[in-house]
Image: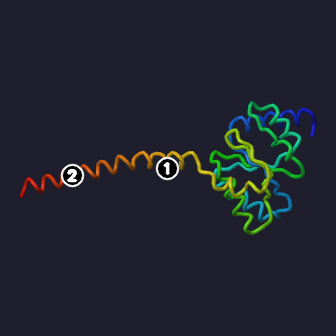
Amino acid sequence: MTREEKSIAIEDLTAQLAGTNIIYVSDISGLNAETTSSLRRACFKAGIKLEVVKNTLLAKAMEASANDYGDLPSVLTGNSAIFISDVANAPGKIIKDFRKKSAKPVLKGAYINSEVYIGDDQLDALATIKSKEELIGEIIGLLQSPAQRIISALQNKFAGSEEEAEA
């Protein structure tokens, strides 16, 4: 790879990193072609971009990025692939699902909304993170619950008053 090609690759990776707040770094080496294809297909269906990257180029892109990736560049050894997503828990769920059949992919680390997670032991926690939409839904449900109880109580009160008035 020429110096110019490396420079272009770093710029592309930097642009990809700037466009997202959710990045998982994993090791998918050793997967056979069929398993790799099915992983790529699952990622595509979930709206996740999966890309095998050179560690040095990704480290330089992280360094050039406005985001603070903390210790995440330290996990860039061996073979690395990045999962880029709009939903925080989607890559974690896909990795966890694939781990039922195989020992790979192995999670090296993740960057989610300015938080850095290092190590494969973080996979369970990352797979259960609630998405922004799920959290908003829960908050709306919690906010609606007291109002619904008040409305129900008022309706019962007025229904009882109308029955007494009719009698």
Percent coordinates x, y for residue 54 in the rendering: 87, 45
x, y percent for residue 110: 74, 47
> Label 2, label 1: how many angstroms apart (C-alpha)?
29 Å
Would you identify the image quadrant in which residue 132 lies?
top right
Q: Nearer the viewer, mark 2 or mark 1?
A: 2
Q: Dot 2 corresponds to which residue?
A: 157
Asked if residue 124 shows in the view, the reply is: yes
Q: Nearer the viewer, residue 114 or 64?
A: 114
- Residue drawn at the location 89% of the way across and 41% of the way down: 56
Give whichever of 59, 37 is nearer the camera: 59
The answer to whether residue 43 is visible is no
Left or right, 7 with respect to 109, comes to right
Where is residue 155? Give x, y as percent.
Answer: 23, 51
Residue type at numbered disc 1: Glu
Which residue is at the front of the view, 44 or 140?
Answer: 140
Within 10 angstroms of label 2, few (less than 14), some, or many (20 or more) residues?
few
Position of 162 with respect to 79 (left or right) is left
* Labelled pair 2, 1 in contact (Cβ < 8 Å): no
Q: Is residue 97 left or right of residue 104?
A: left
Nearer the N terminus, badge 2 or badge 1? Answer: 1
At mark 1, the secondary structure is helix
Say which mark, if any, is on residue 138: 1
Side of 113 relative to 2 (left or right):
left
Outermost residue to the left? 167
